[in-house]
Amino acid sequence: MSRVTVGKWGKNLAIRVPFEIATASGLSEGEEVDIETKDGDLVIHRPVAHARADAQKAAEELLRRRGGPTLGGLSIRELIDEGRR
């Protein structure tokens, strides 16, 4: 856990995210996050990270079922490979 000081940034308050916390969470400059309060605490969510994790789980499930459904004659594997180009 890191302790930081709340500062002023224009008319808003700001918190600087320590490098080790940013690195551990994969947070990068310019990334948008959602912030809310819960029971008086601040909670920061990374919506892109959650969507990416959900997409990865869905892709893994499709790969487990490979050999099954196809789209327009292409297999799921071919579509995934095409998306990587």
Image (cartoon, helix red, strand yellow):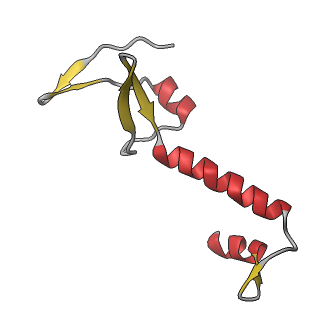
Residue that extends furthest to the right in the rendered view of this protein? 67
Residue 64 drawn above or below residue 8: below
Residue that extends furthest to the left in the rendered view of this protein? 11
Query: From the viewer's perspective, is 76 left or right of 7?
Result: right
Residue 56 location (% of width, % of height)? 67, 54
Residue 32 location (% of width, % of height)? 37, 44
The quadrant where residue 70 appears = bottom right
Residue at 88% x, 73% y is 67
Residue at 51% x, 13% y is 1
Residue 7 drawn above or below residue 62: above
The quadrant where residue 64 appears = bottom right
> How many numbered dots are placed on residues in this image?
0
Residue that extends furthest to the bottom in the rendered view of this protein? 73
Whether residue 85 is visible: no
Residue 34 location (% of width, % of height)? 38, 39
Residue at 55% x, 45% y is 50
Whether residue 12 is visible: yes
Query: From the viewer's perspective, is 71 left or right of 1?
Result: right
Query: From the viewer's perspective, is 50 left or right of 8?
Result: right
Residue 8 location (% of width, % of height)? 18, 22
Residue at 85% x, 74% y is 68
